[in-house]
């Protein structure tokens, strides 16, 4: 009964399952259960993974990595996207608003 009740909550893992691609670290060993395609965040190799985000419309970004996503991935995209952020201690603050108001970003959650 408790497990069923817990399934009614919104969780980062449920949000990851909605996305076509997920940018996060490998802190949670269960990520593979929820994500369709994972790009593990590594500052040195993120540049090498830009092409994996092409033609994806729903993108989950662990909030800790939103700045790097904005700096490295977002400028290379050409299609409209929905960004979902979650699973972090950092918040989306005003410093990200202008970048997330990019014409390609249809919605932000």
Image (cartoon, helix red, strand yellow):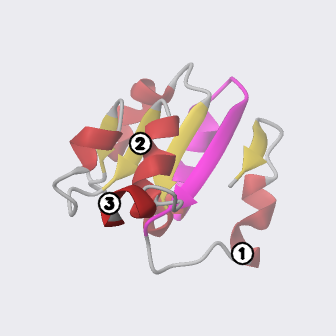
Q: Mark 3 or mark 1, which is nearer to you?
A: 3
The dot on residue 22 is 2
Instruction: Report x, y in % for residue 57.
Output: 62, 27
Location of residue 40 with respect to 54 vertically, above or below = below
The magenta segment: 67-87
Whether 9 is among the magenta residues is: no
Residue appearing at x 79%, y 46% in the figure: 102
Quadrant of residue 85 in the image? bottom right
Task: Answer above or below: position of 27 versus 61.
Answer: below
Q: In the shown orientation, is residue 50 left or right of residue 44?
A: right
Label 3 – label 1 distance at C-alpha:
38 Å
Q: Residues under labels 2 and 1: Cα distance?
A: 22 Å
Q: Which quadrant is the N terminus positioned in?
A: bottom left
Q: Where is residue 82 in the image (x, y as percent from the top left)?
A: 68, 39
Mark 3: secondary structure: helix
According to the picture, the residue beneath numbered tag 1 turns out to be: 95
Instruction: Out of 101 and 29, give the one closest to the viewer.
Output: 29
Q: Where is residue 19 in the image (x, y as percent from the top left)?
A: 51, 36
Mark 2 or 1, closer to the camera = 2
The alpha-carbon separation of the residues under discs 3 and 2 comes to 25 Å
Depth check: give the residue in front, 7 or 11.
Answer: 7
| Residue 1 relative to residue 109: left or right | left
């Amino acid at each position: 009964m408790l497990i069923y009740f817990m399934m009614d909550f919104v969780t980062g893992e449920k949000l990851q399952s909605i996305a076509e691609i997920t940018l996060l670290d490998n802190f949670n060993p269960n990520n593979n259960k929820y994500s369709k395609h994972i790009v593990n965040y590594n500052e040195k190799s993120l540049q090498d993974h830009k092409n994996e985000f092409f033609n994806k419309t729903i993108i989950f970004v662990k909030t800790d990595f939103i700045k790097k996503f904005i700096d490295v991935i977002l400028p290379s995209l050409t299609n409209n996207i929905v960004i979902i952020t979650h699973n972090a201690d950092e918040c989306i603050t005003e410093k990200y608003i202008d970048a997330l108001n990019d014409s390609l970003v249809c919605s932000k959650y």
